[in-house]
Amino acid sequence: MRSYLDFEKPVAEIEAKADELRALLATNESPGISEDIRRSEARAEAALKELYSALTPWQKMMVARHPMRPHFKDYVTRLIEDFTPLSGDRAFGEDEAIMAGIGRFRGQSVAVIGQEKGSDTETRLRHNFGMAMPEGYRKAVRIMAMAERFGMPVLSFIDTAGAYPGIAAEERGQAEAIARSTDACLGLGVPNISVIIGEGGSGGAVAIASTNRVMMLEHSIYTVASPEASASILWRDSGRAQDAATAMKITAQDLLRFGIIDTIIAEPIGGAHRLPEKAVDTVGDTVENVLAPLLALSPDELRNQRSEKFLAIGRKI
């Protein structure tokens, strides 16, 4: 069953009418009904295109958080052949908020890292809604070290509201784990590419997104803190989250203009959740094109390119 966001109500009404006509057509083969269905579908598509061509930052955030949006597991299933998951940080334990492993991406051996939010109550709890503990980031560091040892590029898929801020996480060194993961990303001697597929929240995202190329899906977001948290900090009023979303410049379009990301990946009309397989394939095609020239660079060239990229942020707008 299709799930609609609040701002999609005009489209929902048109598509509901089309569904009613389809049900009527099942009992009445009138050609007039078929024509009405075609007109309703055309109206719905036009309304959807108009809505999504002018989304506000807050609306983009709603799309980025859509529960039916493709998650890390969907990308791995469709893009990575012979995926072998790897678990544990070899220090404390396993954290399923960050998943990692090795496989083949269109013939190229790769290491894959990403946050998994889960798709239902059981999996969301198991993956802690994509909010990683320190052991998750230490696992990422371990996988990156292994990838460098065997000359495998690293692909990161980011979808998290942020690292888990609980007491247990802080006791086990959350800040240090994030810092070491960020350092490992920046120092890799193999190509690394990150794609923000939903939410890119704070250091929890940066820890695996400090890469040679940073890409975002068209309606994803990348932010230092959630709009709700930012509104509470800035104005002591979480009700001003929409104002915070606008002020913080969290959209792919703003971040490309600031030079924080390198590429925007187009989504199907209505968002990736409407045609998830098409969205995943588009990401795969873009990653393949971006990865090819990076494979020709030496370890020092990759590190220098990465360093220059991040040092340039904020120096020109």
Image (cartoon, helix red, strand yellow):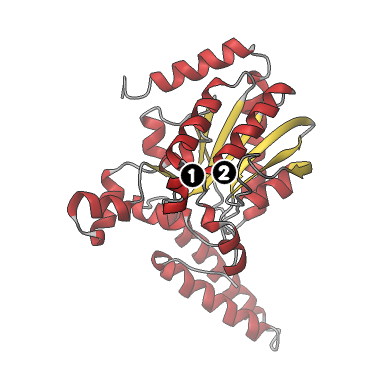
The reply to whether residue 220 is in sight is no
Q: Position of residue 257 (x, y in %)?
A: 37, 31
Q: Residue at x 45, y 62 (%)?
A: 47
Q: Amino acid at mark 2?
A: Glu
Q: Residues within 10 Å of mark 2 (few under 14, many from 20)?
A: many
Residue 220 in the figure: left or right of residue 139? left
Report the number of numbered marks: 2
Instruction: Say whether disc 1 or disc 2 marks the residue closer to the N-terminus.
Output: 2
- Mark in front: 1 vs 2: 1
Residue placed most toward the observer, 270 or 220: 220
The reply to whether residue 54 is in sight is yes
Q: Residue at x 59, y 78 (%)?
A: 19
User: Which quadrant, please, contains the C terminus?
Assistant: top left
Q: Residues within 10 Å of mark 1 (few under 14, many from 20)?
A: some
Please, is residue 181 above or below residue 312 in the view?
A: below
Query: Element under label 2?
Result: helix
Residue denoted by label 2 = 135
Residue denoted by label 1 = 172
Residue 22 in the figure: left or right of residue 220? right
Please, is residue 193 above or below residue 49 in the view?
A: above
Q: Residue at x 69, y 28 (%)?
A: 147
Residue placed most toward the observer, 90 or 103: 90
Residue placed most toward the observer, 76 or 286: 76
* Residue 148 falls in image quadrant: top right
Do callouts 1 and 2 mark residues in contact (Cβ within 8 Å)?
Answer: yes
Q: Residue at x 43, y 22 (%)?
A: 310
Q: Position of residue 111 (x, y in %)?
A: 69, 34
Query: Element under label 1?
Result: loop
Q: Position of residue 274 (x, y in %)?
A: 58, 59
